[in-house]
Amino acid sequence: PTTLLPYSERIQLHTNPTAKRILEIMDRKKTNLAVSVDVTTAEEALEVVRRVGESVCMVKTHCDIIEDFTLAFSEELVKLSKELDFVIFEDRKFADIGNTVSLQYSSGVHKISSWADLTNAHSVPGPGIIKGLSTVGQPLGRALILLAEMSSSGSLAVDGYTKQTFQMAKDAGREFVVGFIAQSRIDTDISDGEDWLILSPGVGLAAKGDSLGQQYRTPKEVVGDAGADVIIVGRGIYGIKGGEQAVKDEAERYRKEGWKAYEERLQR
Ligand code: 5BU
């Protein structure tokens, strides 16, 4: 199973440039941490990114929660992603027919495909969603991940839905779809010679969950036991009390925890 290979040896198993870059950054910066920057102004978001940038392989955004979103903001984010060496993941969770998602991806206020290296989609509309997004993203070297499982309690993305999502990605090929949002390795390890990236949200060292259904596990549980590649942490990092240095320190703490769990996994 590719889970037991180092990130560096998995680079060559991908053809998509964004997937390769993610694995290269993880190896170079010794980090499997993605920080989710769920704050509501552009300046706050950029401030968090400047604090955590050195510790992460990925910054995850929800561009539609930023009240003063402009393309100047996304340009600055892209600049920081080059300076501090991370990939931008817009957690858009597309969920419509191919034609509509291709417009939502390329157009509107956000023009997501112009700045986000990676985005994600629900599999519920069927394979047309992948086709629609790939028309826009693939020529730009972007990548897509599918939501195979969610971290929230009572999620319907389980069992057969998860399996069929995996099959949909396999059928689409790995030129554009490079992995999954999931809480486990799903079935990826039994498909020979194919490497898929597993990104897991719902990671926290302090809380067990929130009042709205979120459920947290530790980096050790997520990377070590469940076999995920990237841990996604939001409030656990940007929400820490104690000011800017505390945010920076907390990102480093999660980076170290995530990397330790990965190294232990390789020893098995
Ligand atoms: P938190 O503050 O660490 O709970 O934030 C988690 C982030 O990950 C947040 O932006 C969610 O929208 C996102 N997320 C999630 O929590 N669970 C999921 O299954 C998916 C995304 Br998909």
Image: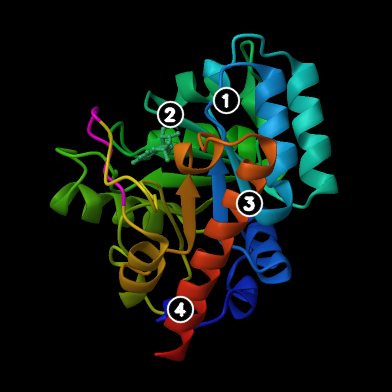
User: Which comes before the other along the chain, label 4 or label 2?
Assistant: 4
Q: Is residue 220 above or below residue 214?
A: below
Q: Quadrant of residue 256?
A: bottom right
Towards the viewer: 257 or 136? 257
Q: Nearer the viewer, residue 255 or 98?
A: 255
Rendered view: 147 above or below 211: below
Task: Give the residue displayed 51% in from the left and 80% down from the top.
Answer: 263
Is 78 included in the stretch rendered in magenta?
A: no
The residue beneath circle 3 is 249
Residue that carries the numbered disc 1 in the rendered image:
105
Mark 3 / mark 1, whichever is N-terminal: 1
Alpha carbon distance from label 4 to label 1: 31 Å
What colouring does the structure picture have? rainbow
Q: Earlier in the sequence, mark 4 or mark 3?
A: 4
The amino acid pointed to by label 3 is: Asp
Q: Is residue 179 left or right of residue 142?
A: left
* Real-space Cα separation, disc 2 to disc 1, in angstroms: 8 Å
Seen in the image, is 198 located left or right of residue 36? left
Q: Are marks 2 and 1 in contact (CB under 8 Å)?
A: yes
- Report the magenta residues as a range: 211-216
- 3 and 2 marks in contact (CB < 8 Å): no
**Element under label 1?**
helix
Q: Please report contact status of discs 3 and 1: CB closer than 8 Å, yes or no.
A: no
Q: Which mark is residue 94?
A: 2
Task: Identify the element where label 3 is drawn.
Answer: helix
At x 77% / y 52%, what residue is drawn?
85
Rendered image: mark on residue 2: 4
